[in-house]
Each structure stands twice: as C-alpha cells, then as structure tokens.
Image (cartoon, rainbow, N blue to C red):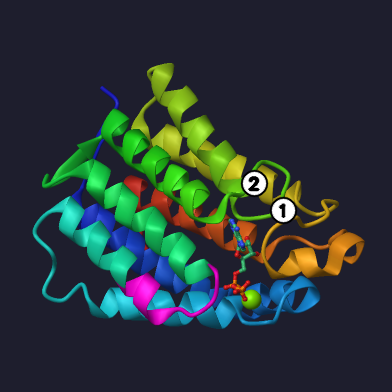
Amino acid sequence: MAGTIGIDALADWLVRFRDAVTAKRDWLTELDSAIGDADHGANMTRGMEAVVAKLDPAPATVDELLKTAGMTLVGSVGGASGPLYGTFFLRMGMTAGAVTELDAPGLAAALRAGLEGIVARGKAEAGDKTLFDAMAPAVDALDARIGEGADLADAARAAAEAAAEGRDATLPLVARKGRASYLGERSAGHLDPGAASTVLLFETLADAVAGRTR
Ligand code: ADP
Ligand code: MG
C-alpha cells in the first residue's frame, strides 16, 4: 500500500520547513542578494515563524491547517514569496478538504493544486528561473512514482531529488519573472533563491512523511 500522511505529520512538515529556512536563512539571503534584494531568507523565516505560531492550538483538519498556513504567509510576508507560497498552501488546503489524513493520490492532488495556484498567481513557466522550476519537477516526480505504485515515502524522496535537480538547473538561466528579471542576462550564473527554498519544502515533506527525528 502506498501509505498516508496524517494531520500531525503535515503540521510537523510546517515546523520542519520553518527549521530548514531558518537554518539556511543566510544562504537564501546570499542567493537573493546576487539577483534580487537580499530578503528571501528573512521573508521565508518570518513567514514560517508566523505559521508555526498559529499551530497552537493545532487545527483539527488538513484544510484548516494548510489554509491557516497560506493565509498567514500572505499576511506576514511582503515579498513575492509570501503570496506565492501562501497561495500554494491555500490551494493545497482547498483540495485536501476537511480530512485528518491524505493518502498518496490525495497528497499528490493537493500538491498539484498548490503548484497550479502558484502559476495562476505568478504566471511562471518552465525555464523562467523561479521556484516553479524546482516545484514542477518535484510534483511531476511524485505523481510518476505514485502512478508506479511506489510507497509515499519513496515518492516524496524522489520529489525532493527532482526539486534539487530543478534548482540546480536554474543556474545558467536568464530570469524572466520577478525582481531577478530586471537584471536580464546578468541573472545568469546564479541559483534562483525561490527554487532553493522550494527544495527545502520538498526535503522537509519527505522527512515528515518518513517521520525522521529532527
Ligand atoms: P521578492 O522578489 O519580492 O524580494 P523574495 O525574495 O522573497 O521576494 O522571493 C523571490 C523568489 O520568488 C524568486 O527567487 C522566485 O523564485 C520567486 N518568484 C518571483 N516572482 C515569481 C513568479 N511570478 N512566479 C513564480 N515565482 C516567482
Ligand atoms: Mg527578494
């Protein structure tokens, strides 16, 4: 059987993501200082800190949990990443519904809806050098592995690996969306900061699914 992820593990994902962006804050800031305005580490840390503060008392259903996360990010982060990650979690929640766990296809559908929300909001396409370039391959890999009958833990790990490959592939790209696009050709030769934080999103999801110790 492909496995499930319960509401406690999903809440644990948000805590792990907060911890990961906090641990990598300086790196995210450094990436954003090369092709943006040096606030991506601060934006993600502030946003996820606000999200984790909303988890006590813990929301009772998956939609409530993820919608709370999304609204909190939209409300607490001024940069592009706040509305984008906020929309991702909001759409995930709307798709998940008032349940207390998601099976593998349910998680895949929620992540796909989150990705589509980001596209609806930011209009990014493949190769624009945005977080889409890490997230789309991650969601595709998760879908593919689940379609092959893989365990959810294996599928989530494959998604994290695909995200990392997508992040690394942003290095030579010229940015066509967001602040980095103002630099034109000079944006080439740097990793996209949002793609870097998206890898952390999928690595921590894989860890939360596997129930690893933090
Ligand atoms: P800001 O650009 O407002 O300073 P952040 O620095 O927090 O916000 O986030 C920048 C990241 O947001 C970029 O590295 C990119 O991945 C992502 N991003 C910006 N615009 C878009 C967009 N239109 N669609 C998808 N992602 C985008
Ligand atoms: Mg920035």
Amino acid at dot 2: Asp
Verify CB contact (< 8 Å) between mark 2 and mark 1: yes
Residue 66 falls in image quadrant: bottom left
Determine if the magenta segment contains residue 147.
Answer: no
Q: Residue at x 29, y 26 (%)?
A: 2
Helix, strand or loop for disc 1: loop
Ligand 1 picture quarter: bottom right
In the rendered image, the residue lying farthest to the top is 148
Q: Residue 154's x, y, as percent?
A: 44, 33
Which residues fall within the magenta stretch?
A: 72-80
In the image, is residue 96 above or below residue 196? Answer: above
Q: Is residue 172 left or right of residue 11?
A: right
Of the 4 image quadrants, the one containing the C terminus is: bottom left
In the image, is residue 198 above or below residue 104? Answer: below
Number of numbered markers: 2
In the image, is residue 181 above or below residue 138? Answer: below
Q: Which residue is mark 2?
A: 133
Residue 48 falls in image quadrant: bottom left
On residue 129, the disc is 1
Of the 4 image quadrants, the one containing the N terminus is: top left
Judge whether residue 160 can be spotted in this image: yes
Q: Residue at x 63, y 57 (%)?
A: 195
Q: Real-space Cα distance between discs 2 and 1?
A: 6 Å
Amino acid at dot 1: Lys
Q: Residue 12's x, y, as percent?
A: 29, 61
Determine if the magenta segment contains residue 79.
Answer: yes
Residue 19 falls in image quadrant: bottom left
Mark 1 Cβ and ligand 1 under 8 Å apart: yes
Mark 2 Cβ and ligand 1 under 8 Å apart: yes
In the image, is residue 133 above or below residue 77? Answer: above
On residue 155, the disc is none
